[in-house]
Amino acid sequence: MIELRHLKTLSALRDAGSLVEAAERVHLTQSALSHQIKDLEDRLDCSLFIRKTKPICFTSAGQRLLSLADEMLPMIRSAERDIARLAGGEAGRLNLCIECHSCFDWLMPTIDHFRQHWPEVELDLSSGFSFQPLPALARGDLDLVITADPEPRNGITYVPLFTYESVLAISKQHRLMARKHIHPTDLEQEVLITYPVEPSRLDIFNHFLDPAGVEPSSIRTAELTVMMLQLVASGRGVAALPNWALHEYLQREYIAARSLGEKGVWCTLYAAIRDDQKNADFMVDFLNTAKEVSFRNLTGIKSA
């Protein structure tokens, strides 16, 4: 009566918070997902969640099935990994490189999870801030690059992980607090605080300032996200960061944030891998785990 697909659907619905987003995550149309849930409710003769609530509120029956999903889905994933290792004798190397400073918060749990389940795969990690990682990936020096700036290259596949909004962090006393969203020209008078990378590798330049032909008054760099936000809160400048990286600070009202432009600047984070490794069992599992951990832990992201 209760099938594996039902547990996956309910888990996605809880994590996504809406039918539209949940349907995207399980690769169904919204109509097909709604029909699947209604069919299960008819079989069980009870409702699983309360309609027209935001975020979605599950009934006692729905909560019980979610508990079952939380217990069973990891066990099934673990069994699938074991079978893949037995079938393929998977041993290999996974050298990761990150072009995203604020990605360490969600990538570390992914790596910990991966290390536990693939102990025979040699794992290494580096940051791509002092060299060009994509050429290194093409040469075989690296195996996976986390990037928001894909470049077409022969033999390289870009796997979308999630989509996020890049927003402007400002102090609570900033003159731009009165704005609902930011215009490019608003930053002509501002000190822009960024990570220590080339402007061409930053979302705010690629998708907001450069198309408008605008430059900030000056640029100041900081290595750590927390350092950037301390400077922002102290009125030393403004910073453009992923929405999910600011969630905790916005909740504490430490800073404020505004969208870049009326529609916002939305970007996609990718995992770049070589074509010859994209079907390796440990690579497929790492990518699936990265997506699951991201959607479970990050606020404000969407399916790519």
Image (cartoon, rainbow, N blue to C red):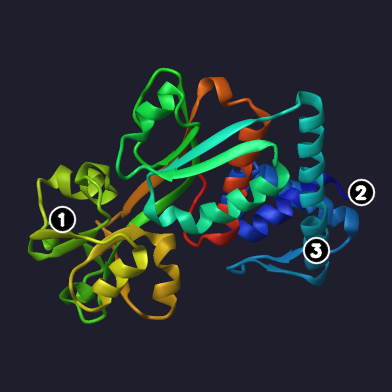
* Mark 1 Cα-neighbour bin, 10 Å: few <14, some 14–19, many ≥20: some
Image height of 36 relative to 173, above or below: above
Q: Are marks 2 and 1 in contact (CB under 8 Å)?
A: no
Judged from the image, the secondary structure of the residue bearing numbered disc 3 is helix
Question: What residue is shown with label 2?
Answer: 1
Q: Amino acid at mark 1?
A: Pro
Q: Earlier in the sequence, mark 1 or mark 3?
A: 3
Question: What residue is shown with label 1?
Answer: 184
Question: What residue is shown with label 3?
Answer: 67
Judged from the image, the secondary structure of the residue bearing numbered disc 1 is helix
- Residue 131 picture location, percent across and down: 30, 38
- Residue 51 picture location, percent across and down: 67, 65
Q: Is residue 32 left or right of residue 68?
A: left
The residue at 58%/40% (across/down) is: 123
Q: Is residue 202 left or right of residue 126?
A: left
Image height of 295 relative to 95, above or below: below
Image height of 100 relative to 286, above or below: below
Q: CA distance from mark 2 to mark 1?
A: 55 Å
Q: CA distance from mark 1 to mark 3?
A: 47 Å
- Residue 252 picture location, percent across and down: 42, 80
Image height of 179 relative to 269, above or below: below
